[in-house]
Image (spheres, helix red, strand yellow):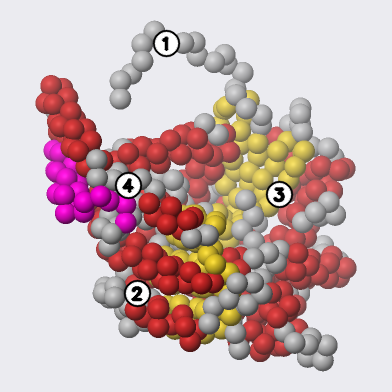
Amino acid sequence: MRFRHALRWLSAAVLLAATLASQPLVAQSLASFEQRVTVHRLANGWTFLLVRRPVAPVFSFVTIADVGSAQEVPGIFGLAHMFEHMAFKGTPNIGTTDWPAEEKALARVETAYQAWQAERLSARPDAAKLEALLAEFKRREEEAGRFVIKGEFDSWIQREGGVGLNASTGADTTRYFYSLPANKLELFAYLESERFFHPVFREFYQERDVVQDERRYSVDSQPVGKLLEQLLGSSFINHPYGHSTIGAVSDLQSFTRTDAEAFFRTWYAPSNLLTVLVGDVDPATAIPMIEKYFGRIPSRPAPPPLRTVEPEQIAEKTIVLKDRSEPLYIEAYHKPAITNPDEPAWDVLDLVLSSGRASRLYRSLVRDKKLAVSVSTFSGIPGAKYPHLWGVFVVPAQGAALDKVRDAVRVELDRLKSGDLADAELARAKRRVRATLVRDLQSNEGLARQLADYQRFFGDWRETFRYLDRVDAVTKADVQRIATAAFVDSHRTVGEVIRDEQPAPGPTTAQEGN
């Protein structure tokens, strides 16, 4: 649950530097790293960062679309995640046996679905007509399915040695990523440009059913998922951070392929996309390929900015969820966007409270008072581009009363507000930031992700390397100041899961039809 955006890949630059002995760490690593980074912006607006790191003959990439559930409006909640699924379905050149015929068949599918949905959502739907329209829709789906080569996009990548093919959708961002051998750079350029040039929304309604299953698994059947969804909805009354990324049940049953195509045209404009490649990539070879394939995509108007600003929370809120699971406790407060100058102070505060067995919350709740089996903090929920939530998540020990858990958590927050922070604790937290950066150095893909995030948030990937200077500048007074401003009763939302002792409902004699 921790959003450790904190630029963990600085150590990659450290390892690439020739010497580190005589110059300051950040200045030396940034100067060395700049020599290996090429920024190239296409005429259509798509930005590329190429990082030469020839440790092995492979490369990884991350493509970021600056869109997530925060860009959705009522009626299409969940569509950002739905499009992520569609991006693997292929194009007119990938995933079909006969595109001209399939294109006509898909048009008939959409016409049939729109007719069925119009009747379903009418004031007085006719049952017999609904049945006939649904049968027609299913028939058209079956016809269109005969042209589909399932998983062809994935197969091309795997056949050529690609690994790690995946994607993720958040409140702020949708990411697409995988790795390939260095000699497959042109294959990457073709495939990645192809699916954002003219994606085909084949098998849309079957895939929508898959997303509904994901929601049932990750939210509806999980006490943590249900509690977090309620927490977000209570914490944000205006901002779209208040709805979950997986989507609303009714919207997942109602948005259409036509809706998805309109969403793609708006939010997947080339100027809203960023790709970072890291590995054995020579810019002299790569840039002509990028121009050839990605440059063929026409430019489109930049998407509109998000206008809604969440007002200051003025009332403490408590959500109590009864469930047949073990109790849980969450306490959340509003926190500024990641670009706020106080972000490093928040990271220090976070580490003081919950990093390891020496952290304050662990020592208090788990070790000393034995009120919890685990305790952690989280940030970046549900996103970080805009003001969001910071909080404490506790799994209480068996028999521990939630009010005692609550009191123990607030004692530790109040200590920070009072200025109770020793020099040694502050220094230890800063060392942990550095240690985390080194420990978390893993892969080309990880480096690509971090550079992409800071390029997107700050407009300059170099902010990745300036982070440690900002952490070093954090003072005890900074930590006290942000704690005092944030940990206010009226800014707080509490979520509790309490055990429901009612017996589970018995089996029913009939099942509802789909």
Task: Give me the residue at 68% from left, 64% from top.
Answer: 442
Give me the C-alpha separation between circle 2 and circle 3. Answer: 45 Å
Task: Give me the residue at 14% from left, 43% from top.
Answer: 108
Disc with the residue nearer the chain's start (2 vs 1): 2
Q: Nearer the viewer, mark 4 or mark 1?
A: 4
Could you say whether the residue bearing mark 4 is in a helix, strand or loop? loop
Is the residue marked by circle 3 packed among few (<14), some (14-19), or many (20+) residues within 10 Å?
A: many
* Farthest top residue in view: 509
| C-beta proximity under 8 Å, tags 4 and 3 | no
User: Which x, y percent locates residue 437?
Assistant: 72, 68
Give me the C-alpha separation between circle 2 and circle 1. Answer: 57 Å
Could you say whether the residue bearing mark 1 is in a helix, strand or loop? loop
Where is mark 3, residue-wise?
A: 376
Is the residue marked by circle 2 packed among few (<14), some (14-19), or many (20+) residues within 10 Å?
A: some
Q: Vertical placement of 232 versus 143: above or below?
A: below
Where is mark 1, residue-wise?
A: 508
Disc with the residue nearer the chain's start (4 vs 3): 4
Task: Give me the residue at 66% from left, 89% from top.
Answer: 31
Disc with the residue nearer the chain's start (2 vs 3): 2
Give me the C-alpha separation between circle 3 and circle 1. Answer: 40 Å
Q: Nearer the viewer, mark 2 or mark 3?
A: 2
Q: Vertical placement of 392 versus 265: above or below?
A: above
Residue 287 figure quarter: bottom left
The quadrant of the rendering that contains the C terminus is top left
- Residue 149's disc number: 4
Disc with the residue nearer the chain's start (2 vs 4): 4
The amino acid pointed to by label 4 is: Ile
Give me the C-alpha separation between circle 2 and circle 4. Answer: 23 Å
The amino acid pointed to by label 2 is: Tyr
Q: Report the front residue among 234 and 247.
A: 247
